[in-house]
Image (cartoon, rainbow, N blue to C red):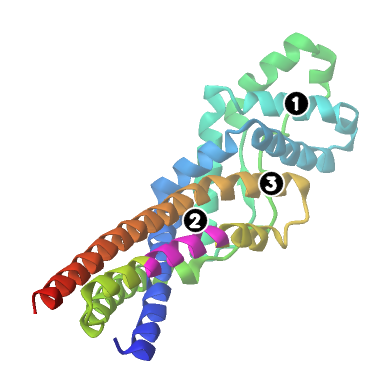
Amino acid sequence: MRSPIAILLAALLGVLIYVGNFAWWFDREVVDSQNFVDSAVVAIGREDSREAMGRLIVDQLVDRYPILIVVESNLVGMFSDLLAVPALGEVIGVVAIDVHERITTGNQNAIVINLDDYRDVIMAPLISVAPRLADLIPEDWFVSIEVLDDGALPDLSLYARWISTARFVAFVGAAALTALLLWIVKRRGIGVVLVGMVFMLAGFVSGLLVPGGRWLAMRDVDSRSIEVLVTNAYNEFARSLLLSAAVLVLIGLGLVAVGTALWSSLEDDRSTRTSAI
């Protein structure tokens, strides 16, 4: 076995497997609008996410109408509960679509929602429980509520444009390097074991970098409410990345097992021929 060349090829193969796995995940979970919206709706639908959304909405309302500060906590709880009502479920979907458009095109405009169509749904429970509180709500407070400020979302447009190309190059390159590595390593068992170890390493690295990605996503967040939303969204999106990392590790374990068996079989054959001589 030409060790230095084999080690270099193995290192390059590991990088390509990692890049290909990440590119596949990014293209599937972030660039694909339907998958992105589905995951975002699940993340925003969590109880703490709904409370954070309610807080963001109420913060905007209190800024515009300071008199509402006396009922601020009531409004947060009300919006948190209302966002769980099916009639308002499409609002979450609209927010998710707007977020996807912002991060994949580089549009840094604020996320604004219009709740005017849901006035009756929102006001009904408030009127029944606290009619005097409902009287404090201005007629126009449902229009143009800013949920996320300008520049609050990351610009991933460059990655979105090139990720499919990166995935293709990584997968083709990994296939070519695997074949070359198995050709260079004359003992097929050792070669298969080496490739398996590379897959395992790439899987472990993919899994270990998920916490690092979470820190990167959170480093510029200065709002507790946005922190909750980003954390829940990141965890939901990272779930499939962790799963693919586990698959890589399992593939690696399988290759190591096959390579070890092949190596052992060849060694037994060699011993048998030596004994016969």
Q: Secondary structure at mark 1?
A: helix
Q: In this figure, which residue is indicated by the disc labeled 3?
A: 146
| Mark 2 Cα shell of 10 Å, populated few (<14), some (14-19), many (≥20) | some
Image quadrant for the C terminus?
bottom left
Q: Secondary structure at mark 3?
A: strand
Q: CA distance from mark 2 to mark 1?
A: 29 Å
Q: Tell me the kind of residue under disc 3.
A: Glu
Q: In this figure, which residue is indicated by the disc labeled 2?
A: 101
- Coordinates of residue 183 in the picture (x, y in percent): 20, 82
**N-term-proximal mark, 2 vs 1:** 1
Image quadrant for the N terminus?
bottom left
Q: Does residue 18 appear left or right of residue 180 in this picture?
A: right
| Mark 3 Cα shell of 10 Å, populated few (<14), some (14-19), many (≥20) | some
Q: Secondary structure at mark 2?
A: helix
Q: In this figure, which residue is indicated by the disc labeled 1?
A: 77
- Residue drawn at 69 percent across, 28 percent down: 79
Q: Tell me the kind of residue under disc 1.
A: Gly
Is residue 138 visible in the rendered structure shown here? no
